[in-house]
Amino acid sequence: MNTVEKKIVILGCFDTKGEDFSYLLECIQNKDQHVITINTGVMESTANFTIDFDNSLVAEASGISIEAIKNSGDRGKAVDLMGQGAAKILETLVAENKIKGVIGMGGGGGTYIALSAMQVVPLGIPKLCLTTLAAKDLSRQVGVKDITLMPSVVDVAGLNSISKLLIQQAAAAICGMVDVKVEVSDNIKKSIAISMFGNTTKCVDKCTDLLKDKGYEVLAFHATGVGGATMESLILEGCFDAVLDVTTTELADDLCGGICSAGPERLTAASKMEIPQVVVPGCLDMVNFAHLDTVPEEFKSRQLYSWAPDVTLLRTNREENKILGERLATKLNKSEAKVTVLLPIKGISQIDSEGDIFYQPEVDKALFESIKEHTKPSIPVIEIDAHINDEDFAVALVENLIKII
């Protein structure tokens, strides 16, 4: 039976960076690796190698001709479209099981195209970009993907003693990464995704210990926006058998414009993948902002708490909690798999406990009533007479999760 040979994809603008990419290809081939080349440059290639997917095919994959892109004279549009086209081609190569790694190089435009295209490549397939922008905040472009950024130090604009050294190292890095052998355990464990925050750490740690004792693999995600979005992305990639969503605080940031929003798709992936989930309204008592002076004017008269010098927490009010309860329920109602909601009656965060700064049981009650009112009858909503960080609550979470797995 014939097997498909997996190759390393070299992705970039071969028009303005032809010399650089020719050298990169040579370095990779010198390590006995085979390549697939994708040209995202708009003009004619200046590279000295055969191109597998030229710019005309990349443009076509984005739904437009390369001539139309050239004639538009719009650089921003060209960068966006070539990124979209390269992503479509990479998506097909991934589906055909033809790639084992992706490497790109560039300045501003080339980096954007490479990182945009790499978004379709799943976790575990190495992705590296040698870029002039590595020291900048590229969190939005990298997103939730396992992309390695490597500073180019000098511009990617022709070979010199520094660029040649770093291109050699980038080539060595991607070749080393694709040759890593992943150890496969004979004892295959079910994987559980769990969400956490500083305010729910005690609960999550106990749940993790209990689940590991029962033979499960537990992967924790910090609910900082990127963490929740990453968890959702990996759920969609089929990485988990179930979800223990202890810390849904990112819904509050999405509602109030906090800095830890994971976007409107938070709390949707498990339903789409039809995997079981146990959900808690953990830390919905708070919205995250940065330093105190960054809090929007509309919230400055509200109850605020400095968790750290660069973290200011806003206490959510009754009206916001009614909305949050409805949103949480509405998202879960779409699931065809088993779902259970657990409500910790004595507080939903570390600082929402009797005598502490955010303790407002009447506001929590509004949240709980909203969840119960809007959740469909087939989803159990269980009230536990405990605080979210009590051991009894962690035990109840794990018992209910195992019941529905």
Image: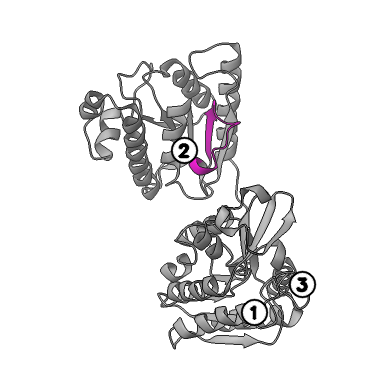
Label 3 crowd (10 A; few <14 / some 14-19 / many >=20): few
As helix, strand or loop, the secondary structure at mark 2 comes to helix
Residue type at mark 2 is Leu
Q: Position of residue 194 (x, y in %)?
A: 61, 66
Q: At label 3, which amino acid type do we have?
A: Asp
Residue sitting nearer the eye, 306 or 112: 306
Which structural element holds mark 1?
helix
Residue 45 placement, left or right of 276: left
| Mark carried by residue 115 | 2
Q: Give the range drawn in magenta.
A: 127-141
N-term mark: 3 or 2: 2
Quickly name the residue at label 3.
356
Residue at point 52% right, 47% down?
Answer: 145
Separation of marks 3 and 1 at Cα, in angstroms: 24 Å
Task: Determine which residue is flagged by label 1.
Answer: 397
- Residue 325 drawn at (x, y percent): 51, 76
Task: Please say if the residues under marks 3 and 1 sit with CB atoms less than 8 Å apart.
Answer: no
10 Å neighbourhood of mark 1: few (<14), some, or many (≥20)?
many
**Mark earlier in primary sequence (3, 1):** 3
Point out residue 249 in the picture as x, y percentages from the top left corner.
59, 65
| Amino acid type of the residue that numbered disc 1 sits on in the rendered structure | Leu
- Which residue appears at 50% of the width and 81% of the height? 370
In the figure, 215 relative to 292: above or below?
Answer: below
Q: Real-space Cα distance between discs 3 and 2?
A: 44 Å
Whether residue 6 is visible to the viewer of this picture, yes or no, is: no
| Tag 3 secondary structure | loop
Labels 2 & 1 near each other (Cβ < 8 A): no
Up-down: is 377 above or below 252? below
